[in-house]
Every structure is written in C-alpha cells, then in structure tokens.
Image (cartoon, helix red, strand yellow):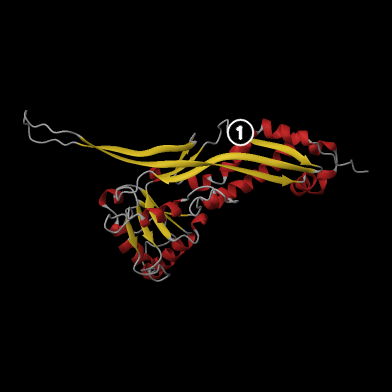
Amino acid sequence: MAGKFIFTPEDYQNAAIKYRREILMTILQGVMNTIKYMTGRPGIRYKERVGEADADAQFAPYDPSNETDVNLNLNLRELETFFGSVVKNFEPNTAVSTLLGTGATKGDGQMQTPTAKLVLQLIAKRLSWYLNNAIWKAKRNPTGKTTMDLFDGFDTITQKEIDATNLSAEKGNYIKLPEEITNESAVEVIRDNILFKLDEELRAQTCYLYCSQSILDKYNVAYQMVNGALPYNREFGHTSVEGSEGKLIFCPLSNKAGSDFIHVSPKRNMLVGYDSLGDVESIEVARFKPFVLSFIATMFFGTQFERIDKQNLFVADLRVA
C-alpha cells in the first residue's frame, strides 16, 4: 500500500532560508541569457551615477608660456534599480506531483528539503523568464502588477531619449530607416543605413547589433539570394554584418521580438543593475491559509545605457519614415 503523502510547511520555509542564495541566483539565471551580451552591475540598490568624465587636453609645440585650463566634461547618467516583490501562492501536493510525477505520493522521503527546494526553484525560474522578457520593453508604473511595470527597459529609455532629442540624426546616434527590412532588402538596408552610418569611433570597436531573430533571418535570406553562387559562401548564416570586419556582431534575442529598434553598442555600454545577494533581497515561504503556501520574494532590478553619444550608441528605428 502506498505511503500517505505528507507535507510540512517547515520543509519549504527551511529550504527558503537554506537555499536563499541559490534561489535568488535561479531568478537571475534566465536573465543571464541576455546579460551575457551586456554588462551586469551587481550590488546596486536604487540609484547610481554611471558614465565617464572627459578632460580636454592635448599636446602642442613646446612653449613654456602656453597654458590653458582643463575643460572637464561630465557625461553622467543614472542607473536606477527598482525594488520589486512577488507573493505567489502554491499548493505543495500539486506542485510536487507535477515535478516528480505519481511517485511523489509514495513515501515520506519525497517531502524532505530537496523536494521543497525544487518547488521553490520552479517558481524562481518563472520569475526569471518574466524578468528576461521585460529587459527591452518594460515601462515603469509604480502601481502596476507585473514585471513589465517594474522598471524602464532599454526600448522605453530609447523612446524617452528620442522624445528629448538626445537621440537624433543630427547627433549621429539615431536613424529612422527609409525602408522596411525584408528578405530582399535586409543586406542593403543594414549595410547602408546602419553599418555605414556608424560614427568612426563606434565602428572601430567590437559592438553587438541587438535585434530580433527575424531580423537576422531576413539578413541571411537576403545574403543568400545575392551571393548564393559565391564559392566562399558555404554556410547559411552570418554572425556579423558583411563589411564590418567581424566587429559588428549580430545579437538576436528572443526578448527583442516586436521591438521598434535595432541597437548598436559595445557590451560595456549596456548596463543591467541588480542587487542579487543583498540582505534586503529575500526569499521566504509563509502559510496564511490551510493547504496553501506563499512564495514571497523581493529583488532590485533596472537597466540603463552608460552613454548615448554617437561614439557609444547607435539606434535604428524600424518604424519606417
């Protein structure tokens, strides 16, 4: 006869305490699929100034009487991480049965801490998915109820900078594409309107071209149509834009699907702030009603460009003029 299925809330509460760091890192695990192409800034709570200070100084022919004051240019921006929380109710019997199948009801051994840890990590993975999905499109709404309301994503920040004319054709860090990127036009549009429009200093750096998978698919199809007969074109697929000497690397991301923008930037310029292991961030399990436990977690998270000048960022607007 099968053993009676027994659960104790203490197992989950103890697992939340014992494996707090692991579970918090699980929440960030899925986000790392995007952050690995950016620069993570751990340990940030609320606001931190980022950017660079430039000093205008140069050599001139020797002249002991030639002296000038240094002009210090502060190009500082604000990386803000917002404090978010989640309270997720779950019924332990159902959760464990889902994870371990029918065998979950056989024997008290299934209800020990490792099983409790698995349940909490399952919830944490879902939190991670929503964070990753929001990196570009999130828009801060203090009264909102979803991850999309927690912080301003890169696309939202981009639109604000366009509206403020800090990103503009005149400043050399923005272009509204003259035509749609299609299976026929992708190579020409990306080459002529993105690669060739980059500032010389930005083009000299190794940069990522952050886009949706569909943009890269169209580029590959268009390239194959134009150059399919060339003997060196033996592989269907490109990792960088033709003509960039491998320095402009395609970075297709699932969370970029439906984005209005293509971003070109070095990895160091794309900042993702979080405070993954701080004492304010927490994981706990509480019981407020019979048979139901609550997974409670808090975390800081936010995004920002370190700099938006033409030497560090270029944005192509897919909303055709």
**Are there few (<14), some (14-19), or many (20+) residues within 10 Å of tag 1?**
some
Q: Nearer the viewer, residue 232 or 28?
A: 28
Q: Residue at x 66, y 40 (%)?
A: 296
Please identify the residue farthest to the right as the structure is shown.
Answer: 1
Horizontal and vertical percent position of residue 161: 37, 53
Residue 180 in sight: yes
**Residue 19 sits above or below residue 84 on the image:** above
Horizontal and vertical percent position of residue 168: 31, 57
**Hey, which quadrant is residue 307 in on the image?**
top left
**Hey, which quadrant is residue 58 in on the image?**
top left
Q: For the N terminus, which image quadrant?
A: top right
User: Is 215 on the left-hand or right-hand side of 307?
Assistant: right
Q: Residue at x 16, y 33 (%)?
A: 69
Horizontal and vertical percent position of residue 244: 32, 55
**Hey, which quadrant is residue 211 in on the image?**
bottom left
Residue position for label 1: 21
**Residue 96 sits above or below residue 277 on the image:** below
Horizontal and vertical percent position of residue 200: 26, 51
- Secondary structure under tag 1 reads helix
Please identify the residue farthest to the top as the structure is shown.
Answer: 64
Q: Residue at x 58, y 35 (%)?
A: 281
Residue 36 in sight: no
